[in-house]
Amino acid sequence: MALTIYGHWVSQPARACLWLMRLNDKAFNFEKVEPLLGGTRTPEYKSLFPTGKAPGLVDGDFKLSEGTAIATYMCEKENWTKWLGGECLQSRALVNSYLSSHHTTSRNITMKVFHPAMMGVLNQETPFTEELRDKAGKVMERENKKFADTWLPGLGSRGYGGFVAGLHEPTIADLFAYCEFAQAKQMGIVGGKWDKRVEEWMDRVQRIEHHDDVHRSLFKLRDVYLANEEKRKQKWEMKVFEAMDFDEEGGLERDGVETLLKGKRILDAYDGIETSYVTL
Ligand SMILES: N[C@@H](CCC(=O)N[C@@H](CS)C(=O)NCC(=O)O)C(=O)O
């Protein structure tokens, strides 16, 4: 029975699910939806996934939303046991414990750091002001400390194994957490003070297979983001999306970006410097 994942490679929970699929060499159909352009709020999408969020999974006539539920479902269905914490009941419970906390902890990084920074580049009406940047830096520091204190010590009797909950092998908890934390560094959004424990953990997760492949779209977005930041600094005319070069699976599509920006002007909202219409 066909298995389809609806999502976007820039979406953090979607990326974690897609990474899991790649790691386990599982074939699936991919349906790209553009959350930024309202793709998750269409009647068609909501008839499949009433939560109106990506990712979503369709497996035959079964439909499931919420990234962590999708990843857990796939691991259970396909016996990818090691990604759930192995056979040990308590390791699995610790992974679940992280996944439950994820939405109100690490997920803040997308909501309060990544999203405002991206929207600041994509939409003149929501500039990423110095105030937002400062707030983002504080969120990063707070989440770093919380994550390191809570999830990076050895939690069981077996000492610290280097992954979430002290486990010796990575699990889906690492994939979901990494997709939140790493993006702030990968995109160069905020400096802030990184906790050494988090940085060391990120180095380990970064070495997991398919890392670069599943982050391709994010890296492209980073190039655009950094180019814009640089132009902003140098007070050059901004043609925000000229650098975008999309491929089949990732990134915002030109049509999509055009729609998003239709009738809008991109400007340096910080200094009110020269503006330009976006040309694609
Ligand atoms: N709790 C959900 C959150 C998913 C989520 O926030 N998805 C975003 C994309 S990263 C989305 O679909 N946003 C569209 C919207 O809020 O309208 C999960 O972890 O899967």
Image (tube, helix red, strand yellow):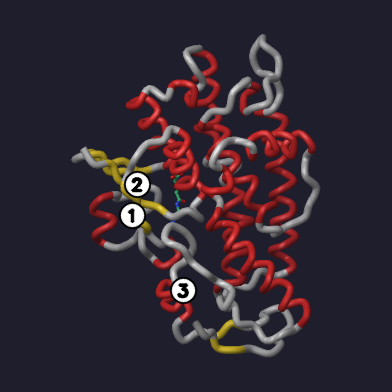
Other residues around mark 1 within 10 Å, as few (<14) / some (14–19) / many (≥20): some
Q: Secondary structure at mark 2?
A: strand
Judge whether 174 appears above or below 258 on screen.
above
User: How far apart are the alpha carbons under marks 2 and 1?
Assistant: 6 Å
User: How far apart are the alpha carbons under marks 1 and 3?
Assistant: 18 Å
Judge whether 41 appears above or below 80 on screen.
below
Q: Amino acid at mark 1?
A: Glu
The location of residue 199, given as percent across then percent down, is: 74, 39
Q: Which mark is residue 257?
A: 3
Other residues around mark 2 within 10 Å, as few (<14) / some (14–19) / many (≥20): many
Rendered residue at 70%/48% (across/down): 140
Judge whether 217 appears above or below 237 on screen.
above
* Mark 2–mark 1 CB contact (< 8 Å): yes
Task: Name which quarter of the figure residue 223 lies in.
Answer: bottom right
Rendered residue at 73%/57% (across/down): 190
The location of residue 105, given as percent across then percent down, is: 60, 41
Q: Which mark is residue 31?
A: 1
Name the residue that disc number 2 marks: 5
**Sequence-wise, which precedes: disc 2 or disc 3?**
2
**Sequence-wise, which precedes: disc 1 or disc 3?**
1
